[in-house]
Image (tube, coloured by chain):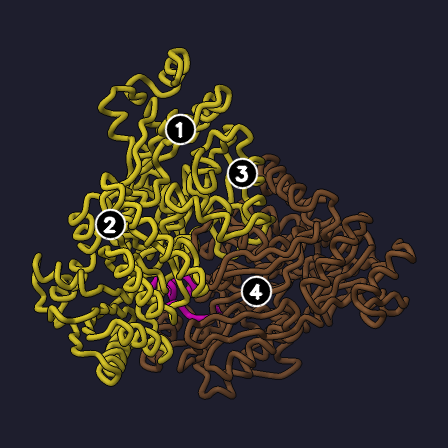
Chain colours: A brown, B yellow
Amino acid sequence: MISESVLVELQNILGREDVLTAREILKTYSYDGTSQWTHEPDAVVFPRTAEQVSAIMKLANAHRIPVTPRGGGTNVSGGSIPVLGGIVLCTTKMDKILNIDRENFTATVECGVVLMNFNTRLAAEGLFFPPDPQSFLAATIGGIVAENAGGPAGVKYGVTKQYLLGLEVVLPTGEIIQLGGRTVKNVVGYDLTMLFCSSEGTLGIITKAEFKVNAIPPAKKTILAIYDDVAVAGENVSLVLKSGVTPAKIELLDNWLIHRIEEASPLGLPGEADAVLIFEVDGMAEAVEKEADKIIEIARMNGAREVRPARDQDEANRFWMARRAGFAMIFGRAPTVLAEDVTVPRGQIPALIRKCRELSRKYDLEIVVMGHAGDGNLHPSVLTDIKDREHFARAEKAVEGIIEAALELGGVLSGEHGIGLEKQRFFRRALGPTVTDLMKNIKSLVDPNNIMNPGKIWD
Amino acid sequence: MISESVLVELQNILGREDVLTAREILKTYSYDGTSQWTHEPDAVVFPRTAEQVSAIMKLANAHRIPVTPRGGGTNVSGGSIPVLGGIVLCTTKMDKILNIDRENFTATVECGVVLMNFNTRLAAEGLFFPPDPQSFLAATIGGIVAENAGGPAGVKYGVTKQYLLGLEVVLPTGEIIQLGGRTVKNVVGYDLTMLFCSSEGTLGIITKAEFKVNAIPPAKKTILAIYDDVAVAGENVSLVLKSGVTPAKIELLDNWLIHRIEEASPLGLPGEADAVLIFEVDGMAEAVEKEADKIIEIARMNGAREVRPARDQDEANRFWMARRAGFAMIFGRAPTVLAEDVTVPRGQIPALIRKCRELSRKYDLEIVVMGHAGDGNLHPSVLTDIKDREHFARAEKAVEGIIEAALELGGVLSGEHGIGLEKQRFFRRALGPTVTDLMKNIKSLVDPNNIMNPGKIWD
């Protein structure tokens, strides 16, 4: 619990209207994009400047009050849930796009800017920020950096860290620091910008970010390919990439999702199809045409049941809507969904999918597979109900099996969702004690009183 | 000095032939790619495995002996000079390319592999590692990672950190750790891989690296453009990039270098020309043609005195040889060269060049400017002689002026050469005390006895 005097101090820093403690508000900030945890904070605060964030952190640090940073609350590993109570520091009022530098292809943005708004403003200048998490309608820049967000475009464009040039961060002890800069080439001491990227809000509050942005490619094209066997789809991914073509996106949907799509907004996909791949190529028009032709040829020659190049942007949008609706369809079908995020070297995708099916049979569960086939980042989702203890226990066993399989196949625990609360129990096993302790020691160095998003990653 | 008993222990770990202490050997390992510092180590050792490196580090840590890692010794900021004596740990016998995974576009290499050998092996598979420091004939992977090497290709392809997926590192205390993995998407705790990248050998010995590699683009084309005014060249760079074309390389040579080229291997460049830009575009043949045409058109319409598309690969090679010979020509003309490495937002290149000319007049010195115009990373080189005290003092003043100008223009101290010994005196001023102390505290955490490449970055 936060004392009355601390609340008064918070009000002095922010004004009364930006310190909220009403019960219904606390409930609103007790959960995120996951479906298995909730915990209410004692207060929710809305700073507007780095100086205010600094004052809040100094106060919290002096009183040992946990602070959990939160933007749009779209985290999918429990990272923005205030599991130890205390303060939720909500960044949504720090929402200014400070600069778009058309000449240098850089942009400076505050932490609370919603990704979609950022991209809308960039688009007016012919620019875009490539990482495209499916939460783009609500996810904010602070979380995108703190989680090193990815998305479908990862196969060609990489993830957030590839675009991050500099940061303004408020440390748990209240100092405001500037890291990195405005240039891609920058080797001035240790790369602390990258230390804060993917730190899941445990090392400080990101208040501002400087990004490299790209010019919007003049042309793009979408191709949908249907397969009777998901293993053939996996091989097609490898064949396309080996041919020298790097599509912007290669997404995979399994048979379960094909059925849901046909129920919701039919694309005429055959019910018995085992998998669908959706490719997008982008770049100069001439290259796009040639690359699209290559993909179509490879798919047709190598076992695809049917290949459909989108006739126009309208049809392409319909294909992509089906993909984007994927998670909503999954979450709509079960009270609790354990949405996995393992990543394997992409050649191992068929093996990982086989393993998911085996686990589905073994534990008698529905496991839906979709994800970013181009970079090996799959999201097998286990449908369950946390209130049905026996069912949920089987679901947790299946998740363990998926994670073990991914690690055995040369992969990692999490590709883009982070550890948060979800994967804590696998963390030390995956990284070993020396590396885990090194990370914990860095955490202690930066946050000696462990007030910054405590209870996450390794606790 | 290293005691006789420690030498015997080193011999027990490595065998007698891999522990060298002869005077002429120590002299060989007393310098690097810079021309102003030398310091002899007490011993040079050549481990072949991570386990041997671990045993060496445990021994050195127990006896508080400085260890300076070194590969090809091509460092250009003094990073591989053993300024406090002790052991030079030379990685050149750890030179195995362990795996090239054509399917996943990844490669696993030991730290002592020479970049050129790595690229030769990759080329046989149709692959390449994009960062292209000019030291590629001798630079080794460990140094390339520890310095986060860049090069001309940075404008399109970024720098080493964009390709680094995982590392094996031996800590100063001897533990062997594995960081990162084999996938681009990987968010499992803090990004320690990036902490070791650009750590300049001060946090541990990198023994193995896992890289993302690219498919060799099917076509490329080179264009040389000649300008009467370097400011017009700078504007041309911006115009090309704003047009949506991202060349693989955009290199700049100034009037001084134009004269040297005409003396050494004439390309018929006019002696009164103020600057030359060399562009390379790569990708699918159709796109390359179109992009090359766009560059030619932009240059011709916007003030270039002459534009020469290379007629064939032979002529392209001649253009690039001239660029590559740049540093050799500069170093051949003066006993000491202070080769700067500042980086500015690329729109500020003309301003930085103007400043260099102003400083050249003010201090009556030759300052040659060349570098990677596409990403704002310039290498103004001040020609001087460390033995002529008065001249050298003026040269140092000029370097200070260049660095101050770069920082004022929104740039950074070093784009790709690192801090090493060269820029220590500017370090704290550039980063401020809080960030400097944070880095030093991380160093103390990882290397409690300060044995790992001591005397660098901030000392």
Q: Is residue A319 above or below residue B191?
A: below
**Residue plotted at (63% across, 48% down):** A401
SS for dot 4: strand
**Residue plotted at (62% across, 69% down):** A110
> Which chain is mark 3 on?
B
Mark 1 / mark 3, whichever is N-terminal = 1
Amino acid type indicated by mark 1: Leu
- The Cα–Cα distance between marks 3 and 4, rounded to whole angstroms, is 25 Å
Mark 1 or 3: the one toward you:
1
Mark 3–mark 4 contact, CB under 8 Å?
no
- Start-end of magenta stretch: A236-250
Q: Name the side, left or right, on which B217 lies relative to A449.
A: left
> Which chain is mark 1 on?
B
SS for dot 1: loop
- The Cα–Cα distance between marks 4 and 1, rounded to whole angstroms, is 39 Å
* Same chain check for tags 3 and 4: no
Q: Is residue B330 above or below residue A229?
A: above
Q: Residue B393 — which label?
A: none
Q: Mark 2 sits on what residue?
A: B120
* Same chain check for tags 2 and 4: no
Q: Residue B443 — which label?
A: 3
Residue A240 on the magenta span = yes
Q: Mark 1 sits on what residue?
A: B84
Mark 1–mark 2 contact, CB under 8 Å?
no
Mark 2 / mark 3, whichever is N-terminal = 2
Amino acid type indicated by mark 3: Lys
